[in-house]
Amino acid sequence: MRLINYFERKASGKLVQELEGLRFLAIVPVVVQHCVERWYRNAYTPGVSGLSDALINYFLGGGTGVYLFFAISGFILPLPFAVRRLSGGPMGNLKVYFMRRLTRLEPPYMLVMLLLAVAALLLHKMTMGETLGYFFTGITYSSTLVYGHFNLLNPVIWSLEVEIQFYILAPFITWLVFGIKDFTKRYITITAAILLIVFIQEQTGISSAYNVLRFTILGQLQYFLLGLLMVNFYLEQKLKPAGFTKWWDVAATIAIFSMIGFRWVTGFGKTMLFIFVLAVLFSGAFRAGAFSRFIKHRWIMAIGGMCYSIYLLHLAIAQACIEFILKINHHSLNNVWWFTIYALLFLFCLVLIVPVFYLLVEKPCMDHSWPARLKNFIKSKTGRGLSLEKTTGGPATTDKL
């Protein structure tokens, strides 16, 4: 079996390949941003070089990949509900929907949070009280609301808290919007909702970095609605290539680099322009030629499929790497060669750790039947033990008399 076969994701339904490629385009800038940010915070002095300042400031914008993740979720989660709504079918079993999210996402998440909590205690990074506080607010997706800032065990989980909030709302928003049978009316409704939400955010101050609500669904809903808008196009066959593929190649390529260049999205005009850039990128993934083929390469899709494992682990790995570099050489500050060593070490650890975690923890959880299979396995082992006890009249033993 080829190596790629172990990492390719198997979907229970039709796998939309473009979405796997978009996940790749979302996770790579985020990983690069946190790699650069750890160096910037710990081993760089701004003003040393105009060129290095410019490059660092640009790559620090990679965090905007999170908003692309929101748009992808805004596409994936509503899609089956939209199909059922338009076909006149029932909404479906919401218990199954929520259990699927729970069994798919929680085991990897809980394990990572537990490992980070143990590491924080063993390395004396936090007190017991702080560790328990961040651990329990983390696993209940309430860190941002409770503390008013990111979870210090794993700051990136703020976006997962927002995702969970959308998971809860997605079926109902989709059912409401796709109750409108006309494509154009749905398009106008979703677009108007995006404009209204961004306007309200600006007027109420929710868009401010100092407002904790920015880091909830109230501050991020517009990006999920963009994904819903793409569902509207997708179901009407309006995302299929229809000429101008080379122009879409250029537009999508410009869009991905422009997305990073935004760095911080605030203000009505800038936010709407950013949403437009994401829309071009999303559409280009489907309608472009070479660009679309690139993101549908098997390894690109495989890495995109591992994005959850990468997202959970990458920041902790970057922090460990920068601390190791500074420990072995205190004079590595502002040194481009030591930055290169740090970046290569980070990449090596990422490639070494993440695939193993993905194969052993995350990928098995993608099989929605794993809880039932685990239950049957435990029953079979327990049943066998009980049957042996009944047969021998006592506990089973391998000792020979």
Image (tube, rainbow, N blue to C red):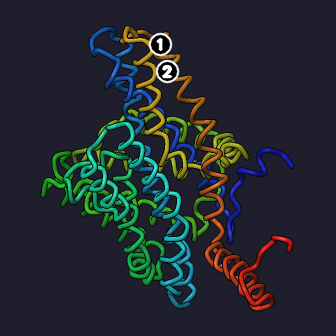
Q: Residue at x 62, y 52 (%)?
A: 305
Q: Residue at x 35, y 60 (%)?
A: 162
User: Which amino acid type corresponds to the residue marked 2 in the rendered image?
Assistant: Tyr
Q: Quick one: 9 or 62, which is closer to the camera?
A: 9
Q: Locate residue 375, reporting x and y percent.
A: 64, 79
Q: Which mark is residue 338?
A: 1
Q: Quick one: 60 or 127, which is closer to the camera?
A: 127
Q: Is residue 279 above or below residue 182?
A: above
The answer to whether mark 2 and mark 1 are in CB contact below 8 A is yes
User: Which amino acid type corresponds to the residue marked 1 in the rendered image?
Assistant: Trp
Q: Residue at x 64, y 45 (%)?
A: 355
Q: Is residue 199 visible?
A: no
Q: Is residue 42 above or below residue 241?
A: above
Residue at the spot of label 2:
342
Q: Locate residue 35, reporting x and y percent.
A: 44, 30
Q: Is residue 125 above or below residue 197?
A: above
Number of other residues with Cα within 10 Å of mark 2, as a class: few under 14, some 14 to 19, many 20 or more? many
Determine the residue located farthest toward the front in the rendered image: 401
